[in-house]
Amino acid sequence: MAVKAFGIVSSPDQSIHVEGLQDYRPIGAFSFLGRFRVIDFPISNMSNSDINRIQVYVRSRPRSIAEHVGSGRHYNINSKRGKIQLLFSENSSSRSIYNNDISAYMENLDIIQRMHQEYVIIAPSCMVYKQDYRQLLDAHVASGADVTLLYHKVDNAREYFKNCLTISVNKQKGVQSIDKNLGTANTKNIFMETYCMKRDVFVELVKAASWTSSVYTLSDIVNIKCKDMDVRAYQHRGYFATLTSLEDYYNASMELLDYDIASDLFRAEWPIYTRTTDSCPTEYYDNAKVTGSFVSNGCLIEGTIDNSIIGRSVVVKKGAVIKNSIIMAYAVIEEGVHIENAIVDKWAHIIHAKNIRGEIDAPLYIKRQDTL
């Protein structure tokens, strides 16, 4: 069926805060694998699913998202009929309990109601996965449900997905409740904060949430409405990561250094689009030794890099060793520095601190533009 849906890319709940990284930009603007931004994944999923009217909601520190998304031309959206709109919420206090998705939708309700498409697909800007939304929409329409939620079944919910929501599903794939993951069981259905419903149903839910409580989110109102609405679940298969903590971001990045895992996410027939930056190829000097790593363009590499992700235009001097780490764009690592299990933010300059080591399950974070 022709896609009759528009897309919404939502901002994460204000209760989620990724230590360090989020002080400078929203999760959607996080650099991912040196080349992408996290927001590229939901927008590319929509573009590849023939959804070419997309609203991107930005709540705080909008500059980096606005700069990266721009006109949206690089997402291969139909230039005649398609359009990406950046929509801002006036409540700029990033940690306020009132600064949630419902308040952002209420402020832009007239724009939502003017959309010609009958259905809406809502996806978060803090999760990385590949999904053909046409299949989700087809299943939703065929089921006759009011709302369909996308979920991913995991068997490690005790240790991971701590900031995520879970859904309880009956045998008929009906959703009984949406709950916080409290780490009480390994096997859980993680709610991917991705919804499919008619635009009019969405508008009614937004109004109901706003009328019921100023602090209600979309998931809160859907949870309450499970009792008297037909809410179904649709299972996602394939690679899935949430980036709702520093550890999650680190683990998801490291995991994708495994070729088999990465080739499940990145497929030729399902491109992940991003804004490209023209720069020279990376230069590897005679002393350079690089194994099992992603290295972006424009770098100068003299030292040793193992199992790491190196952003654009990073300089790694002679004798420096980088292991199991993420080094973001424009960082400079001077001679003899050893970095292990760390995340080094943009424009950091590591000179005097010769030994920077975190733990695999607790990576060390070095601030943006910091000199050590």
Image (cartoon, rainbow, N blue to C red):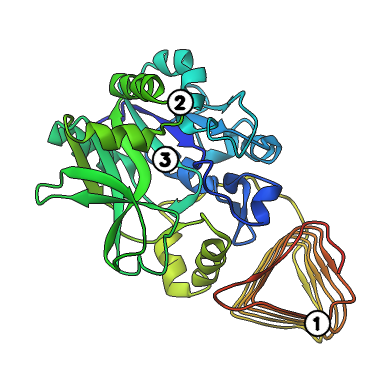
Which residue corresponds to mark 2?
214
Q: Nearer the viewer, residue 78 or 97?
A: 97
Going 42% across and 44% down the picture, which residue do you hit?
45
Question: Is residue 135 positioned above or below 82 on the image?
Answer: below
- In space, the residues marked 1 and 2 are separated at their CA atoms by 52 Å
Q: Residue furthest right?
A: 352
Up-down: is 266 above or below 290? above
The residue that label 1 is drawn on is 320
| Residue to which mark 3 is pinned | 123
Residue 240 in view in this figure: yes
Q: Is residue 256 above or below residue 167?
A: below
For the N terminus, the image quarter is top left
Q: Quadrant of residue 355?
A: bottom right
Whether residue 82 is visible, yes or no, is no
Q: What crowding class fits label 3: few (fewer than 14 Cα within 10 Å), some (14-19), or many (20 or more)?
A: many
Residue 371 on image: x %, y %: 87, 64
Q: Amino acid at mark 1?
A: Ala
